[in-house]
Image (tube, rainbow, N blue to C red):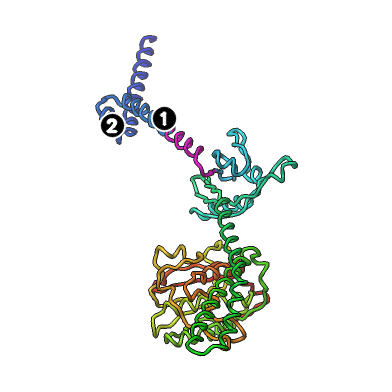
Amino acid sequence: MFWLGFSLGLLVGLALLVGYRVWLELKLKNLLPDLKSDTLRATRSSLSRLLWAIAFQQETCRDLENQVERWKQLLYLAPIGYIQVDEENQLCWCNQQACQLLGIQAPAAARPRLLLEIVRSYELDELIEVTRDAQKPCQREWTFQPTCADPTNLSQQQAIALRGIGIPLTRGEVGVFLENCQEVLILSQQRDRAFSDVAHELKTPLTSIRLVAETLQSRLDPPLRNWVDRLLNEAIRLSDLVQVLLDLSQLEREAGSCLNLKNVNLPELIQSSWLSLEPLARKKQVELDYGGPSKLLIQADEPRLYRVLLNLLDNSIKYSPSGASIQLRVSLEPHPQAPPESTQQWVHLEAIDSGSGFPENAIPHVFERFYRAEPSRSRRYPHPSASSRPDNRSPASDLHPSYGSGLGLAIVRQIIEAHRGTVSASNHPDTGGAWLQVWLPWQPSNLTIDR
């Protein structure tokens, strides 16, 4: 009986062993159907193939780890800052340049901390949140003030201009590239200061030349008087150019503090600016096609907004063919760059002409000072007399570079940004002409709109 029981147990054990081996072989065959290595396919044993696959995967993992380490080393030594946070906004990793820009130390892997505890920059924190919500690269510029633990060194801590580009990563992580724009800002300020200084120096002699020319104008007879008229027109042109440069400098220095805000009826202001340009429009047989409400009150600086409208309309008149119409559209819409949950309405002003439009390579530069996309933009128009100016306002030739100075759209952008708005330029898909879009903030609490 003992041997019988022993034999039966042995047979059962062998049967289980064979069954397990068959089951294991089937599982291995299911796990290894897609192996493409010739070495592994030449191996008959499934177990051997699995061991080869494990070794191959380990080698691949080591190669990937080496590549990640090399890329991390390059990123660490890169001349641009980089930080990476997890889904809870804890700082995971940053490179050497980011540590210098933000005035922090590299985080310890064992003790992750919230980014806002290490870097007191709510703009950076907001950029990370916007990037995570949008799931696309986002960009923002701001002035960063480094914190200092030693109160005796507060005077040595200088604010720097930063540009951040957020990139969404996997598992809710976000990477941010940080660029130091302080040198560019300093060069821009030096350039603007030079323009302002030159404009101030030119203002007095130009005024003297203008006064002398006006005095001689009434004392000379033709043909000598024609030369004085030309001299006076050129002096007026240069004086207007100097005034535009001074206005730009003032807007940059004082931003919104130099604005005298009050309730302004935008459609009425548009009509007034078009009447000022009517002689130019009549000469080219160009008409205004206005679309929008008959009354729309906004908070704005009326003279400066009037200048914006003059520059936009004058720009459209110059580039529209004879007999064409200029489309001017006004509406209330959400800003295209606003968060989806935002309910704020913006005044959307569109100026569309039927001309040849902007060259594609010129669109990013049309709002830069003294930039002209093509020589035809410098053609001149007769200077209207002072008596034809309604409400003692300057005509477009006084405000916009009708003489080809390239400052018209530059001052448009400066005034709109001072109103905390935005302006963009492109070519309209239907007309093919220039498409200038202005967005101004609108508060409905004490303002009205009539359709």
Picture coordinates of residue 20 (x, y %)?
36, 25
Taking the image as drawn, is residue 345 in sight?
no
Q: Which sits in the foreground, 34 or 105?
A: 105
Which mark sits nearer the N-terminus, 2 or 1?
2
How many numbered tags mark residues here? 2
Left or right: 232, with 111 as reference point? left
Taking the image as drawn, is residue 98 in sight?
yes
Picture coordinates of residue 16 (x, y %)?
36, 22
Residue ID for mark 1: 62
Q: Which residue is at the far bottom?
A: 221
Q: What stretch is highlighted in magenta?
A: 65-82
Q: Which sits in the foreground, 141 or 385?
A: 385
Question: In which image quadrant can residue 148 be found?
Answer: top right
Q: Residue at x 24, y 27 (%)?
A: 42
Q: Does the magenta stretch include residue 80?
A: yes
Q: How far apart are marks 2 and 1 (CA)?
A: 18 Å
Left or right: 143, with 58 as reference point? right
Specify the amino acid type for callout 1: Arg
Specify the amino acid type for callout 2: Ser
**Which quadrant of the rendered structure holds the N terminus?**
top left
Element class at badge 1? helix
Q: Which residue is drawn at 57% across and 85% down?
A: 386
Picture coordinates of residue 393 (x, y %)?
60, 82
Q: Which residue is drawn at 45% across and 81% down?
A: 326
Q: Which mark is residue 37?
A: 2
* Mark toward the viewer: 2 or 1: 1
**Which quadrant of the rendered structure holds the C terminus?**
bottom right
Q: Which sits in the foreground, 390 or 82?
A: 390
The answer to whether 242 is drawn above or below residue 137 in the figure is: below
